[in-house]
Image (spheres, rainbow, N blue to C red):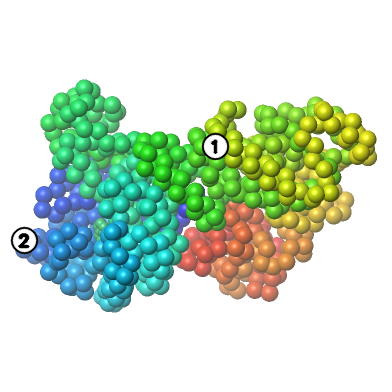
Amino acid sequence: MFEIRQRDGLARVCRMVTAHGTVDTPALLPVINPNRPLISPREMKSTFGAQAIITNSYIIWRTPGLREAALSKGVHSLADFDGTVMTDSGTFQSYMYGRVEVGAKEIVEFQRSVRTDIGTILDIFTEPAATRDDVASAIEETIKRGAEAIPGKGEMLLAGTVQGGVYADLREDCARRMSDMAFDIHPIGGVVPLMEGYRYADLVDVVIASKKGLRPSRPVHLFGAGHPMLFPLAALMGCDLFDSSSYAKYAADGRILTPAGTLRVNELAEMPCACPVCSRHSAKEMAESQRLMAEHNLHISFTELRRVREAIRGGHLWELVEERARAHPSLIEALRRLATHSEYLERFEPLSRASALFYTGPETIQRPTVKRVRARLRERALPFVNKPLVVLPEVEKPYSRHHIETIEKIWKAADARIAVAGYFGLVPIELDEVYPISQSIIPQQTDLETQADAEREIRGEASAIDPAMPVFWDWQEEMTGLREGYPAKGAPDRDVGRVRAVADYQFGAGAGGALTRGAVAIVKSKRTGRIRNAMLDGKHVLSMRAHDGFFTLKPAGATVLHAALKAPRMRVVVAEDAVPFVKAGKNLFAKFALSCDPELRPGDEALLVDSSDKLLGLGQVLLVSGEIGAFERGVAVSARDGIP
Ligand code: GUN
Ligand code: ZN
């Protein structure tokens, strides 16, 4: 039903299959008022490309003409829409007006009777101001209603809403319990007041808490999120579906949506927009027509979602989110709140991206990618500095190329290791080409917060080095001390040093030693002089990728690491049924992956083993721990080689 195509962190481009076609997510479902649609569902598809709409089953149920029509010819005919139709249940009406006449079971059965593709339970809306006790009992009632609704869902997909007010632990618990039931989709509910009040930082806590409890293989819908300004951030947090009546509500109020905020049209002298509507109409014409404003709002909203999907595919969603955060101070606050969740986010953070990391401001340094580099330097690189360390200032990238003369001079004189102190921390020169150290664009002059943070990090990392190894911060001043105290012992083998350092950084401490224990031969590119392949005792063990500086593992390298690293490190365990396929070099599908090393990240190289830890093959991880076992469709590990 739901399959990941591309991902970037918690964000994902997926294909959701329903009885009326597929929906490419993240997707916007425009809200259709069953009584008086401002823009018809047919146009939603033909003009705006909507693959799905959402309408309200409770309004249909309580309106005699609509109810009979829906029951006799189905909700698709009623709406005149042949794509995916989702229906809501009356929860919001119950919240707004205190009660609804319909029963919880009855409204789900009604949704099935009108043959909606995705129905919704009658959950209890928990508002941000509610007390903990009230929220807790509302959750119990929501779960009870959910459990009662499931047996009657039939072929219809059913949405089980996560509630929990602003209590993160209740949200996570509710999400977990909802995930244990046979729902197909999980909306995050009760968030409209947060969005209306620009409480985006609280929204971040609510969404992340919900995501932690939810089964990752089910689409997540953010109920009532309709301002395009919020789409990139919500997608980054792993929301797949949005619904909105904002396009119509704002238009009714004379306002238009932009990705950077909201504008009152009667205050505009001209339209600052290139959409097909604004291109053909003056600001005055726009201000006079609710319909034109709504059309503009839809164009902008659908365009922003296309931009979000492209950003996920291209690996630059973080940049888009940071850029959009400039639109509203509440979004900056939300981004900073997101940084408090980076330990969780890092678990889904890809090893590398197709595009370089762009600095956009002081929030950039808070990204999980930066935190990961620093953690790995502290854990996998700096504790193993076994010589005095000379620290050089950051220059252009890659560091080793731009510092070449200095490096030659130091290595001629002294037996030392060299690191560069920069934005990411204290980077051993051997690691200067791994993502994102080389693949990042950061101005010389950043900002005070970033500078202070980097300096603090460099000092902290320096203290991770063995105290017996002195650190030289000014090589020119200290050259004599270096030369006399630690005289050179012949040129160090820089290439082997690089292979070892990158392997430790990529695969974990100990990997570099194992992959270079024996006769090592390095093949370099004639054109660039960079390492291409590493051979150990005549066997090809590793290839270095030009685009991210990491290794691709070869079968002989996998065999070495399998012997050197204890299970579960780097392992993905393959179900019996899939063993022959993996041995033959076929992809490992999610269904056949039993478990994996919790340290594996998207893009990592993995050892594929059977239940008794026999090596069967190797590949590149697409799904991580927690996702493996949950997804029923799609590839978990993309195969590189089988080991027959
Ligand atoms: N629409 C906006 N918020 C909600 C919610 O929390 N639950 C449901 N079912 N619909 C909503
Ligand atoms: Zn426009």
Query: Would residue 201 be found to the left or right of residue 548 on screen?
Result: left
Does the Cβ of the disc 2 residue fall within 8 Å of ligand 1?
no
Q: In the rendered image, which quarter contains the N terminus?
A: bottom left
Element at label 2 = helix
The residue lying at 91 percent from left, 39 percent from top is 486
The residue lying at 17 percent from left, 58 percent from top is 96
Ligand 1 visible in quadrant: bottom left
Query: Would residue 535 be found to the left or right of residue 198 on screen?
Result: right
Q: In the rendered image, which quarter contains the C terminus?
A: bottom right
Residue 539 visible in the snapshot: no
Residue type at mark 1?
Glu
Residue type at mark 2?
Gly
Point out the residue furthest to the left here: 65
Which residue is more in the foreground, 181 or 156? 181
Q: CA distance from mark 1 to mark 2?
A: 62 Å
Query: Which image quarter: residue 432?
Result: top right
Q: Which residue, given by chain and number where applicable, does mark 2 sit on?
A: 65
Which residue is more in the foreground, 10 or 515? 10
The residue lying at 63 percent from left, 46 percent from top is 373
Q: Which residue, given by chain and number where applicable, does mark 1 sit on?
A: 449
